[in-house]
Amino acid sequence: MKFKAVITGVLSFFRNIKKSEGRKDFEKLLPVIYAKTLVLGFALTGLTFTFFPKFVLCLTLFGNTCDPVGNYFVAIASLPGYLVASILLFYFTNISSQLLIIIIVLVSFVFYFLAGLLIDRLKVRKKTLSKTQLLVVLTFLLLVIALFLVV
């Protein structure tokens, strides 16, 4: 019974993303997709340990350990937050792990909001990029490149 509810939830997750893609308001769409990816990743992690204990990936993203598939969804979606958290951890070594998780999620939300805002403004105005907007675009491209280098 639980398995059917999980499958139904995952299918409705993708249906809702498809419905929201019809809207062109990216400043709301990208953070919502990020939040749904977090929920899906945590659900897959719970599903992995409950029903399919062998549904793990052994990549070098988290070291030489094998981790549930849901952890990879969450880690890849939260990559902007991980970059900021790693810089903070370098300077402040005694930050608690709960605070780091909150920082990772908040920075990722803000990053996806700003990326969506940039996309919306570029579609409306057709102007050239300012220095701040160019920095956001370059950071996003570097994160995508880093993603492919890690995986």
Image (spheres, helix red, strand yellow):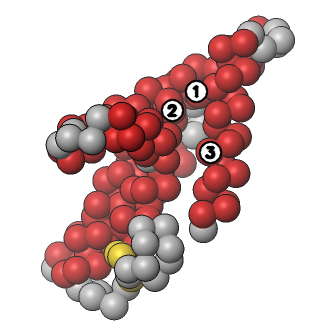
How far across and down, in percent of the image, does residue 86 sit?
A: 41, 43
- Check disc 1 and report its element: helix, strand or loop: helix
How far across and down, in percent of the image, does residue 108 sit?
A: 43, 36
How far across and down, in percent of the image, does residue 96 sit?
A: 17, 43
Count up the numbered dots: 3
Q: Quadrant of the N terminus?
A: bottom left
Amino acid type indicated by mark 2? Tyr
Q: CA distance from mark 1 to mark 2?
A: 6 Å
Q: Earlier in the sequence, mark 3 or mark 2?
A: 2
Visible residue check, residue 105: no
Query: Tag on residue 112?
Result: 2
Looking at the image, residue 46 sits to the left or right of residue 13; the answer is left
**Residue placed at 33% from the left, 91% from the top?**
54
> Front-most of 101 and 125?
101
- Check disc 3 and report its element: helix, strand or loop: helix
How far across and down, in percent of the image, does residue 101 sit?
A: 27, 44
Amino acid type indicated by mark 1? Gly
Q: Nearer the viewer, mark 3 or mark 2?
A: 3
Amino acid type indicated by mark 3? Leu
Q: CA distance from mark 3 to mark 2?
A: 12 Å
Mark 3 and mark 1 in contact (Cβ < 8 Å)?
no
Q: Which residue is tagged 3?
A: 143
- Check disc 2 and report its element: helix, strand or loop: helix
Visible residue check, residue 95: yes
**Residue placed at 38% from the left, 80% from the top?**
65
